[in-house]
Amino acid sequence: MIGIRVSMRLPERMNLDTKQALTLVAGECLRRMHRRIDEGIDVHGVEFAPYTESYAKWKRDHGREPGSAGDWLRYTGEMLRAHGIVSLTKRAFVIGFTGARNAIVAWANNRLRPFVGLPPEEKLAAIKVARDFLLSTWKANMQRR
Amino acid sequence: MSTEAIERRVQASFAQTFRALERRLIALLDELHEQDGLLVSDQFNLARLDKTIRLLRVDLSAAGYDSAIQDQLAGIEEIKDAILAESGKLNLPEEFGAESESMLSMLAQGAEEELLTVADAAAGAVAQALRRAAVGGLKLTDLILSIAATLDIYEGQAKTLVTTTLHSLHSSVRVKHFTDAGVEWFLYAGPDDDVTREWCSHFVGTRVTPAILEEHASEWGREGKTPLRPVTSWRGGWNCRHELIPLLGKGGYREGPGK
């Protein structure tokens, strides 16, 4: 399977909605991954390998603008449309691809231009989202008591 | 049955339909008079062509196009169960079941109308090829090849409709999932190039809410007899290359639409 799995464990007694927190974290991970793809940057912070001349020409011949914002890793757009949460529990979520065909295409693309994954600063940002949400919920709960 | 398996089955059904239609048309064309490979423009041929054109819609139905549509609708019903099972994995609330039912009926209705339009267009294109051949001295073999190529295009369109319907449903599930978690804004992400629809180009790179998208559902080339709803499913229309990415807050993007 190609994708990322993020898990989180909190004491039950805190009585917090971890599913909601994890959904928001997943959304933030997706946004960051898509922004990176649009900028043509891989998970290691390096620019994507350029398209071959023949592929770039073929894309241009079909009305695309190779290498422009929003063009990277898209032709029909099906693979990136299939990119999202594929599993979510109270403790973990998985971001992957729906449909076997899309997962295979993603796997192949990822070999050429690694785009699936989170660099360390994105992991920290995701943790911050979860922490902020859970803290604000917890504070609100405490005030209601 | 998985959504991929259902998709494959419905696509096979369309392929079979178009092959059957092609065989039937070729059999009809075989009966025409020809001389040195050219169609003869005599009264018999013209009358025969007229009859063939009139029967085209009936032929399309007889060849199984209607049942392929029914198959597609039945496929959507099966997919509903598959997706609801997946939504269980995503921990979507139970009331999602009722909402997805109504989304499915809208999708099914939209798909059926579009498929009938494809059938109409296929019949029209074949009729046009027949008329041109009768007056233009096209060779019978070339006519048959041209009809086969025309039908290939429409078969491709019918298959695309099936795939798009399935992916649209997934798209709605995803947006619903994030809005339930409190996400208000989404980034309308994707390319802005020569083949981008006008409607999409107004939104690419901006932040939107499902309500904003619905408000503009019938503008900038998206106004049709049946604007595709919900917009979160279809975005710019069939085969749209754009997607909605959840944003925490406003994400630093300007509000759409804007160009």
Image: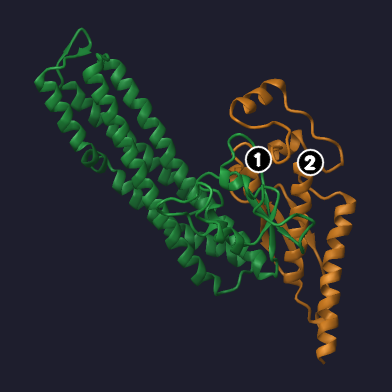
Q: Give the letter of the chain under mark 2.
A: A
- Dot 2, how many residues are within 10 Å of its Cα: few (below 14), some (14-19), or many (20+)? some
Across and down, in percent, residue B53 comes to 21, 33
Is A84 situated above or below A108?
Answer: below
The disc label shown at residue B120, or none: none
Q: How is the image coloured?
A: by chain
Q: Name the residue nearer the viewer: B122 or A96.
A: B122
Number of the front mark, 1 or 2? 1
- Dot 1, how many residues are within 10 Å of its Cα: few (below 14), some (14-19), or many (20+)? many
Image chain in orange: A
Across and down, in percent, residue A13 comes to 82, 83
For this view, does A32 lie left or right of residue A81? right
For this view, does A4 lie left or right of residue B50? right
The residue that appears at 79% across and 52% down in the rendered structure is A32
For this view, does B9 lie left or right of residue B205? left
Gap in angstroms between the C-alphas marked 1 and 2: 14 Å
Choose top left, top right, bottom left or bottom right for residue A6: bottom right
Q: What residue type is labelled 1?
A: Asp
Image chain in green: B
Q: Are discs 1 and 2 both within one chain?
A: no
Q: Which amino acid does label 2 sit on?
A: Glu
The residue that appears at 82% across and 50% down in the rendered structure is A118
Secondary structure of the residue carrying numbered label 2: helix
Q: Which residue is tagged 1? A: B192
Across and down, in percent, residue A75 comes to 62, 36
Q: Which residue is tagged 2? A: A39
Q: Return the residue found at the far bottom.
A: A145
